[in-house]
Amino acid sequence: MGSKHMQIGEVAARTELSLRTIRHYEETGLVIPSARSRGGFRLYTEADVARLMVIRRMKPLGFTLDQMRDLLAATDRLDTGEELSDEERDRALEQVRGFEQLAAERVADLREQLARAEEFAATLRDRLAPVWRP
């Protein structure tokens, strides 16, 4: 067991996810530790960390666990190195493109919400300015 495996605490620190969240993603089948130590501790690789980062980035965009699972399955098919038929490859690529488009739409929605929130905060500052002069 060299430096290529990490225990869950290191993975949590690197991904900024809680131990509980990582375990939950394991229970739901999104990320399965690549190995176990002799003592039964979960061991993760860089690929596992990368997978967790995909999930972490999808979460604030409102993707469901099923959507996360679907995207990961499509990227797994593309990344396995196995020969895919043109149809299988095209189907997986189309799924990934669909998720990219949906993510872009959700990012645009979040930017709009942020702009409205900033306008609101500025309005409050403007209303306080004449009243509160230090």
Image (cartoon, rainbow, N blue to C red):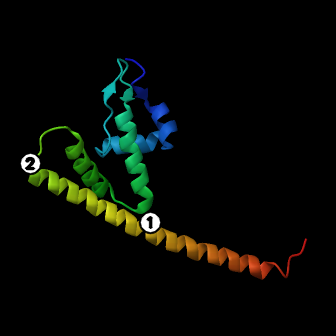
Picture coordinates of residue 22, whole percent (x, y): 41, 41
| Front-lying residue, 46 or 70 | 46
Tag 2, which secondary structure? loop
Q: Mark 1 Cα within 10 Å, few/some/many (few <14, many 20+)?
A: some
Above or below 62: residue 53: above
Which residue is label 1 attached to? 107
The image quadrant where one finds the C terminus is bottom right
Between the C-alphas of marks 2 and 1, the distance is 33 Å
Return the residue nearer the eye: 46 or 97.
Answer: 97
Q: Is residue 5 left or right of residue 118?
A: left
Q: Which residue is mark 2?
A: 85
Q: In screen coordinates, is 82 left or right of 67? A: left
Q: Residues within 10 Å of mark 2 (few under 14, many from 20)?
A: few
Image quadrant where one finds the N terminus = top left
For badge 1, the amino acid type reads Val
x%, y% of residue 54? 38, 48
Amino acid identity at mark 2: Ser
Q: Nearer the viewer, residue 83 or 42?
A: 83
